[in-house]
Amino acid sequence: MKVISKEHKSVASFRSPTSSRVLLLSLLLITSVFVRPEQGQSPPKRTSRETRVTSTTPEEVELVRRSAHPLSGDVRDYDPLMEQVGDARFVLLGEATHGTHEFYRERARITRRLIEEKGVNVVVLEADWPDAYRVNTYVHGEGKDRSAEEALSGFKRFPRWMWRNTDFRDFVEWLRSYNDSRPQGSARVGVYGMDLYSLTDSKEAVVEYLKRVDPEAARRASKRYDCLGGYRNRPEQYGQDVATYSRGSCEKQAVAQLKEMEQRFAAWRSSQSRKPDDELMSAYQNARVVRHGEAYYRLIYFQNLSSWNLRDSHMASTIQELVRYMDALGGERGKAVVWAHNTHQGDARMTERAARGEHNVGHLMRQFHDGNTFLLGFTTYTGEVMAASEWGYGGRRMKLRLALSESYAGLFHQTGIPSFLLSFRGNDALTQALGRPRLERAIGVVYLPGTERRSHYFEARLSKQFDAVIHWDVTGAVEPLR
């Protein structure tokens, strides 16, 4: 039985059919939201008359050129962006690839301003919770790590360069210094992961926490999680074993343990003192990872079910749980900035994936927090990228092919501007011009230049998928840490 490729591999892996049953399941996984789903936006109806743009007119190029805000590296580069973001509680920063230096560097520049000027206090990564929480411990001035590079050494699994790179290391070091400079008693900015791949590490973290606070509860958790034993380095094997009836599902055990952790966390929420309890919050989030990760690894072996929807639902709900936790502390209002791929951050309803019933983080955050979410995408035309030629292989610098002329990056290249910010809000002419389907490139941690058109392009309506985009015509690869 063939496993569906993980979503990082290529855009081709997005193209799995979705059943209404699993779509409902994944939506139900979104817990603790601030707004009921029916109060959000409804997905637009797809029209068969709408055809993809296959050529670019001189008028479109000139419109983009006039609307573009060139980037020069100056400290005020992102003044227009800060004005557009306003007081949004959720700012989602994308990337067209998982291995581009400029994307990491510029997201760091933007995030620093969001922290200093907008009061953002939660940084969320497309990363596993345990690995990111080690970084969180470091930026809070706690733990045994003596440097940002040491704190990042927890990212051991493929693709290591995604977070173990010099750009992110420098940002983590800055954040540690920023937190250290905060007045005594004031809240620190945290760093957290929102992905669900860390099945074994997360279940072990839950048990270890309970051993410290409630040995009897730890024994119950250990007994439940024994069902998932033996899959540390191959969690996908668990899904295959269940799918081939080699073993039974561990769903009931994962659900039972999450319910117990939910009760423990709810008791903290209802307490009058409500002092910060980051260890409890982390254990609760790890139990959520086990619950949803167990479901994810089961579903990837059923090609009529959407593991993509389940994963993005988990990520969106994690963002909201984190902000809700900050709110519960009674101090500064929770505000989050999120670093993830464009395919997670841009509104999926404005891409070809909507016709397949797939949603993503950007779609869900807009739906639940309409008017309080800002989506920013990144594009590139050519250069180099850090990527692997196959899932699980080592990353290397790869030549990035010129973007197709009929793509958004191809259009942006024709402006002749090396790098620029393009805002859609308040620019009706630009929104209309870039609101028809056109090709958009997406490269994860695997790059397949030989089949690039099929593997890395999809149709999107960029001006409706994002609130703004940043384009760099020539980009370089991230520098991995040793």
Image (cartoon, grey):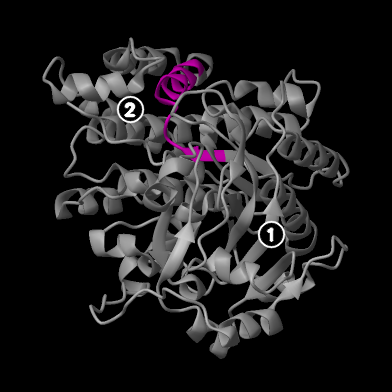
> Residue beneath label 1, please?
472
User: Crowdedness of circle 1 by 10 Å Cα count: few (<14), some, many (20+)?
Assistant: many
Which element type, helix, strand or loop, lies under badge 1? strand
Q: Secondary structure at mark 2?
A: helix
Quick check: 201 above or below 38?
A: above
Q: Residue 376 versus residue 270: which sits nearer the camera?
A: 376
Q: CA distance from mark 1 to mark 2?
A: 46 Å
Asked if the residue at tag 2 contacts the one at tag 1, i.e. Cβ–Cβ closer than 8 Å, the answer is no
Residue at image point 44% right, 55% down: 361
| Viewer can see residue 336 | no
185 is higher (above) or lower (below) than 436: above
Which residue occupies 51% across, 25% down?
Answer: 158
Quadrant of residue 48 in the image?
bottom left
Q: Could you tell me which residue is drawn at 59 percent across and 84 percent down?
A: 58
Can the viewer see residue 451?
yes
Q: Position of residue 283 (x, y in %)?
A: 49, 29
- Quarter in which the N terminus is drawn: top left
Q: Position of residue 75 (x, y in %)?
A: 87, 62
Q: Residues within 10 Å of mark 2 (few under 14, many from 20)?
A: many
Image location of residue 314, percent across then percent down:
39, 45
Residue numbers of the magenta segment: 193-208
Dot 1 or dot 2: first in sequence order is: 2
Q: Amino acid at mark 1?
A: Trp
Position of residue 399 measured from the top left corner of the image (x, y, whole percent):
61, 41
Question: Looking at the image, which residue sits at the far left?
Answer: 245
Q: Is residue 375 magenta?
A: no
The overriding secondary structure of the stretch rendered in magenta is helix
According to the image, label 2 marks what residue? 257
Dot in front, 1 or 2: 1
Q: Nearer the viewer, residue 381 or 123?
A: 381
